[in-house]
Amino acid sequence: MSATELCVEGLTVTAGAHRLIHDVSVNAAPGEVVGVVGPNGSGKSSLLRTVYRVLRPDTGRVIVDGADAWQLPVRRLARTLAAVVQEPGADFDLVVRDVVAMGRTPHKRLLDGDTAEDTRLVDSALARVDATELSDRPFGRLSGGERQRVLIARALAQQPTLLVLDEPTNHLDIRHQMQVLGLLRRLPTTALVALHDLNLAAYYCDRLYVLRDGAVAASGPPREVLTARLLAEVYGVTGEVTLHPRTGAPHVTFFPEETASGGDVVVAEKPAAAIDGRQSEPWSCGACGEGAGAGRSRPPS
């Protein structure tokens, strides 16, 4: 099982008279973890919904390993792509193990039962998100963080080569946030993940796309994208970006008592440096020829 190449080309999505995203292009090389960040309402979820085929684009294409995702049979796409959404939309009347086992559906025919391999994959998925002890509990009685871990386990049981995750750290405590994002680093998959926490995005993502008002405001490796000027222009806040002395990753510090509007912005970043000695490699999408720039770098597992 090899990781998937994802190319999003010129997506525009509207809802009535409202433009959700406009001319957005995003690329993810096989094995990359690509982050999508931006303020509330910037288009992050709309972009991801278009990738996992819930929100049809007005223009543009989603290319998965050279094929148009919107032209693929649903079952075939589900064997490649798994999504973890912000709002699952159902309060499953099932125990946790059965919810995770739903991830095996794309690999089965209508009346197929569970095999020993299915059981092994469900057990492995639960263990990877530290949820083995939840396996016999009713899903509807779990806390928000526990539910989130179970839904991530369901996606893992699907054995995708492309993961699309909308705020996967939502409701999770700090330990489980780091555990889930660290798992993304180790999996042999490509991941497109929307995040609000810029420091987590800076540490765990190879590259970032910053959305503002439905368009890409900046893209590239975190150490190039995250600047004090970007914080002011996109988020409307004052902060500084330094390289963390222990991790080497960009670290954002906000100054709540200050605002970024109506005055000069002080850019306080330190010079960029390779994170943990890692080297970034340029990459271009084989399907659409778009360059993704440098950034094939990974923090330690």
Image (cartoon, grey):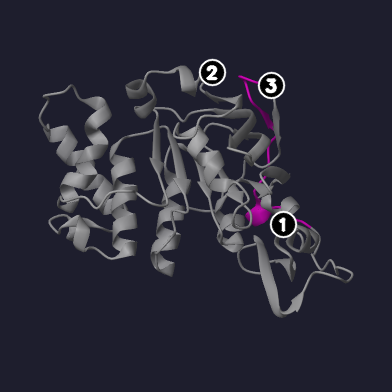
Q: Quadrant of the N terminus?
A: top left
Specify the label residue 289 is tagged with: 3
| Quadrant in the rendering for residue 60 | top right
Q: Is residue 17 visible?
A: yes
| Quadrant in the rendering for residue 32 | top right
**Callout 1: few (<14), some (14-19), or many (20+) C-alpha neighbours within 10 Å?**
many
Query: What is the x, y in percent for residue 143?
Result: 28, 66
Query: What is the x, y in percent for residue 204?
Result: 55, 53
List the single residue furthest toward the bottom: 257
The secondary structure that dominates the magenta segment is: loop
Residue under label 1, please give it: 226
Residue under label 2, please give it: 66
Q: Secondary structure at mark 2?
A: loop
Amino acid beneath label 3: Gly
Q: Is residue 244 visible?
A: no
**Reading the chain from its start, which is encountered first: label 3 or label 2?**
2
Write the start and end of the magenta stretch as one range: 272-288
